[in-house]
Amino acid sequence: DQQVKQNSPSLSVQEGRISILNCDYTNSMFDYFLWYKKYPAEGPTFLISISSIKDKNEDGRFTVFLNKSAKHLSLHIVPSQPGDSAVYFCAAMYSGGGADGLTFGKGTHLIIQP
Amino acid sequence: EPEVTQTPSHQVTQMGQEVILRCVPISNHLYFYWYRQILGQKVEFLVSFYNNEISEKSEIFDDQFSVERPDGSNFTLKIRSTKLEDSAMYFCASMPGTSGGWTDTQYFGPGTRLTVL
């Protein structure tokens, strides 16, 4: 039961170029979405979030786009830097469900090539 | 910058033994969570805790599991009788919860790797 799907297990991008990570969800109740970054042997680190009332949120080099009708979101990183190499998790939740946990995708391993 | 801490970083136990995983959430945060990640799989929600009681739990969180906030700073996850399939990374998270809604950020600890032999 994959309510949050990240269909690309890995992605390789050249330093300085744009990295685009994609995420699809099936549960129409989800209304808050987050991206986390994870290095080996560390916990997930929060990057950026977006509420379903918006279609875009930007924070420095990171922009998240939400297409509710397609149940699709994407994370853009511009420009990509070597330190961005990590596993990126998309997560979703229903804000009206109490203190529900996040539903995570399986992650995309982003590799930034020098 | 405040962070969530977890101990131990790695716990090895025999099947059937009880384990307690410990977490110190960020001070002044009100909501606490446990997640697990089995090797090669996604991070899965186990339980949330607020106001000294369980708020939500997943179907994974069965009677073998319990959580406690014994002293106002620690947040623990106990597994009563471990099984081989409990081997995973266990992540603790905390959330401020002061914005009045649920759309707040959960901050994760570094995890405890539990190995059940």
Image (spheres, rainbow, N blue to C red):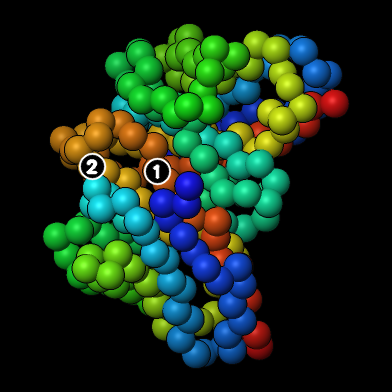
Whether residue A3 appears in this view of the structure is: yes
Label 1: state its secondary structure.
Answer: loop
Horizontal arrangement in the rendering, residue A110 relative to residue B34 (left or right):
right
What chain is tagged by disc 2?
A
Q: Foreground: B88 or A62? A: B88
Question: Residue at (50%, 16%) from the top-left corner?
Answer: B67
Place of residue B105 in the rendered image (x, y in percent of width and height, measured from the top left): 33, 46
Horizontal arrangement in the rendering, residue B10 relative to residue A18 (left or right):
right
- Of the numbered discs 2 and 1, the one sitting upstream in the chain is 2
| Outermost residue, front side | A1
Place of residue A23 in the rendered image (x, y in percent of width and height, measured from the top left): 42, 66
Quadrant in the rendering for residue B49 = top left
Residue at mark 1:
A102
What chain is tagged by disc 1?
A
Question: Residue at (22%, 68%) from the top-left corner?
Answer: A69
Residue A95 marker: 2
Q: Are marks 2 and 1 in contact (CB under 8 Å)?
A: no
Residue type beneath disc 1: Leu
Do circles 2 and 1 both sit on a common chain? yes
Which corner quadrant holds the C terminus of chain A? Answer: bottom right
Q: Residues within 10 Å of mark 2 (few under 14, many from 20)?
A: some
Question: Residue at (43%, 71%) from the top-left corner?
Answer: A22
